[in-house]
């Protein structure tokens, strides 16, 4: 079974391709660009297409399947005949699937389940990564603000941190926000 | 407060939904509207179908195709409100006009003549934003009225509006039928000229509609009625020329259309810049939000669209399909919700489409009702099957 994965996120597409290979579907082609999409699909002639719901080119795919209904080989959308809860899970995860008509439902089901779980895992990873990045950025900012306070007021690191924390509490703001204003002000004075 | 989640595509005709939220019309009815911008029509349809949205900005033919099971997940949608009439523009790319020896302000008959004569030397390709869209069916209607077979003589491709400029640059398309502001954006980039508008093909095109899942609407009857009243007030505000500047600025925001307010104002006023050289043209009723029962969900409009789908071989209409299409439109819900406003509401659910060349008085339970013009470019008249 040949599967085409259309995904604007290279990393996620790679994860899906890998997982599908492990699950016994080695014939997977990743298409990232939207240019010449229909032509490429014609050349690749896949049995199923997995697509990122945020890809604008999805509307083009719908046309391809509509036209195929009349002229080329018959094609249908997988979600048409799967259960409502599994459709909802796919849409919520952000993945769409189309298969060539006649492909047994039982064969596409594991592919779909796998794609949904990978999409969800990727979203979780992304959120965790974003949180970690933000935390790191905040810590750097606080360190710089501490350094500035230590130099300007001739105090120790611990006192500098206490001062930051006290100011933040008094103004009902986050320590990182206070640190940011200190860093910005210092930059202004140095220019 | 009932929360209602609504999806929209960045287009000028999302204006009533933006006004509904931003100007407090919804809140006056105890409704909190959450607006989500979407990238593609298929996405919006699927999210509505599976319940991630409670209501949505939809292409009129898309609501019908979904209920006919022609595309997308199974769903039972209702359309209790038409968000706007008209508003699409038919454009020829500057490269195409050049290649066939026409000036940038060439008229529709000249362009049609060049297509018929095969002057370009290869198949002329038009882009439309979606398969089940008024754009697609109006384009076919105009081509046929000019003696051009849309299946044999030209090619029609679905290209999402944000990808159209690229498609023009690559010479993939020679023309396009697109909703504003995307036509005007292409004109300003020097890439195309507007040569016809939806108004000139069918003066009463139900362009975008408000769709909801039937089950959700039934479970939240009171909120839905309040929402329709708020939508009516929002549409009336949007239609008022005195509000155009404010509305343009609002829609121009990054969260909504993220284009200049000036371009949006052109569509709202119908004073379009038709060519890259700046030739102006005013189109009366270019985009209608609330005028002459324009927001009323006529069964006849839906049945006309179904006839066109059949005309071009996308469906073979059965009595069940006719029934499904009639059931999609919800004129009674519109009537029940809006009666307390004391406005004039049509007493019939269907009308003969294409018969009115100017604003005309019509039967209404109260007040004086005028129906806006709805003529077709070829003078055709569509008489739907006997109304219930």
Image: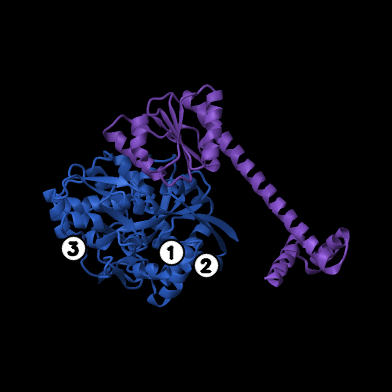
Marks 1 and 3, how far apart at CA: 28 Å
Q: Colour of chain B?
A: blue
* Disc 1 target residue: B259
Q: Position of residue B67 (x, y in %)?
A: 39, 44
Q: Chain of mark 2?
A: B
Q: At numbered mark 1, what does the secondary structure look like: helix, strand or loop?
A: loop
Labels 1, 3: one chain: yes
Q: Read off the chain for label 3.
A: B
Vertical relation: B241 (above or below) B181? below
Image height of B20 relative to A47, above or below: below
**Which residue, as the protein is rendered here, is positioned at the far left?**
B117
Residue bearing mark 3:
B103
Element class at badge 3: loop
The disc, 1 or 3, on the residue closer to the chain's N-terminal end is: 3
Looking at the rendered structure, the secondary structure element under dot 2 is helix
Q: Residue at x 39, y 62 (%)?
A: B13
Q: CA distance from mark 2 to mark 3?
A: 43 Å
Please identify, in this view, whether the residue under mark 1 or under mark 3 is nearer the observer.
Answer: 3
- What's the colour scheme? by chain
Asked if the residue at tag 1 contacts the one at tag 2, i.e. Cβ–Cβ closer than 8 Å, the answer is no
Crowding near pointer 3: few (<14 within 10 Å), some, many (20+)?
A: few
x then y, percent, for residue B325: 34, 47
The answer to whether residue B146 is visible is no
Callout 1 touching callout 3 (CB < 8 Å): no
Q: Position of residue A84 (x, y in %)?
A: 50, 36
Residue B22 numbered mark, or none? 2
Q: Is residue A104 visible?
A: yes
Horizontal side, residue B318 vs residue A117: left or right: left
Q: Chain of mark 1?
A: B
Q: Residue at x 69, y 47 (%)?
A: A132
Q: How many marks?
A: 3
Palette colour of chain A: purple
């Amino acid at each position: 079974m040949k599967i085409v994965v259309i995904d604007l996120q290279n990393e996620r597409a790679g994860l899906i391709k890998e997982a599908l290979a492990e699950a016994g579907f080695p014939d997977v082609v990743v298409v990232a660009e939207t240019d010449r999409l229909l032509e490429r699909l014609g050349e690749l002639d896949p049995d199923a297409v997995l697509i990122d719901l945020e890809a604008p080119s999805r509307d083009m795919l719908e046309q391809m399947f509509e036209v195929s209904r009349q002229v080329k080989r018959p094609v249908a959308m997988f979600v048409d005949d799967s259960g409502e809860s599994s459709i909802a899970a796919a849409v919520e995860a952000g993945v769409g699937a189309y298969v060539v008509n006649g492909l047994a439902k039982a064969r596409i089901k594991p592919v779909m389940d796998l794609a949904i779980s990978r999409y969800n895992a990727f979203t979780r990873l992304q959120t965790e990564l974003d949180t970690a990045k933000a935390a790191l950025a905040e810590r750097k900012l606080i360190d710089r603000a501490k350094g500035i306070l230590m130099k300007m007021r001739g105090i120790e690191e611990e006192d500098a941190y206490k001062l930051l924390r006290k100011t933040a509490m008094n103004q009902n703001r986050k320590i990182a926000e206070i640190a940011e204003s200190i860093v910005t002000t210092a930059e202004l004075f140095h220019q | 407060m009932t929360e209602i989640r609504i999806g929209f595509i960045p287009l000028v005709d999302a204006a009533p939904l933006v006004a509904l939220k931003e100007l407090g019309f919804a809140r006056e009815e105890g409704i909190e509207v959450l607006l989500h911008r979407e990238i593609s029509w298929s996405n919006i349809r699927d999210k509505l179908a599976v319940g991630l949205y409670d209501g949505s900005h939809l292409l009129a033919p898309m609501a019908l195709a979904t209920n006919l099971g022609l595309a997308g997940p199974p769903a039972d949608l209702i359309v209790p409100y038409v968000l706007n009439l008209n508003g699409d523009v038919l454009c020829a790319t500057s490269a195409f006009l050049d290649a066939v020896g026409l000036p940038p302000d060439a008229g529709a008959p000249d362009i049609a003549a060049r297509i018929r004569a095969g002057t370009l030397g290869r198949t002329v390709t038009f882009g439309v934003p979606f398969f089940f869209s008024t754009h697609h069916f109006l384009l076919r209607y105009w081509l046929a009225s000019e003696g051009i077979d849309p299946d044999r003589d030209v090619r029609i491709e679905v290209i999402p509006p944000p990808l159209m400029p690229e498609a023009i640059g690559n010479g993939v398309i020679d023309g396009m039928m697109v909703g504003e502001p995307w036509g005007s954006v292409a004109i300003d980039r020097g890439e195309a000229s507007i040569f016809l508008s939806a108004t000139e093909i069918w003066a009463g095109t139900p362009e975008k509609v408000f769709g909801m899942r039937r089950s959700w609407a039934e479970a939240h009857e009171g909120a839905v009625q309040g929402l329709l009243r708020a939508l009516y007030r929002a549409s009336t505000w949007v239609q008022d020329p005195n509000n155009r500047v404010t509305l343009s600025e609002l829609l121009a925001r990054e969260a909504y259309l993220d284009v200049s307010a000036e371009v949006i104002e052109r569509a709202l006023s119908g004073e379009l810049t038709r060519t890259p050289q700046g030739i102006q043209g005013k189109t009366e009723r270019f985009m209608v939000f609330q005028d002459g029962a324009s927001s009323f969900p006529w069964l006849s409009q839906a049945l006309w669209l179904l006839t066109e789908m059949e005309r071009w071989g996308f469906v073979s209409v059965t009595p069940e399909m006719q029934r499904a299409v009639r059931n999609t439109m919800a004129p009674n819900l519109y009537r029940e919700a809006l009666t307390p406003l004391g406005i004039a509401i049509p007493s019939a659910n269907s009308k003969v489409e294409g018969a009115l060349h100017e604003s005309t008085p019509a039967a209404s339970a109260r007040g004086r009702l005028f129906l806006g013009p709805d003529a077709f470019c070829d003078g055709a008249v569509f008489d739907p099957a006997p109304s219930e």
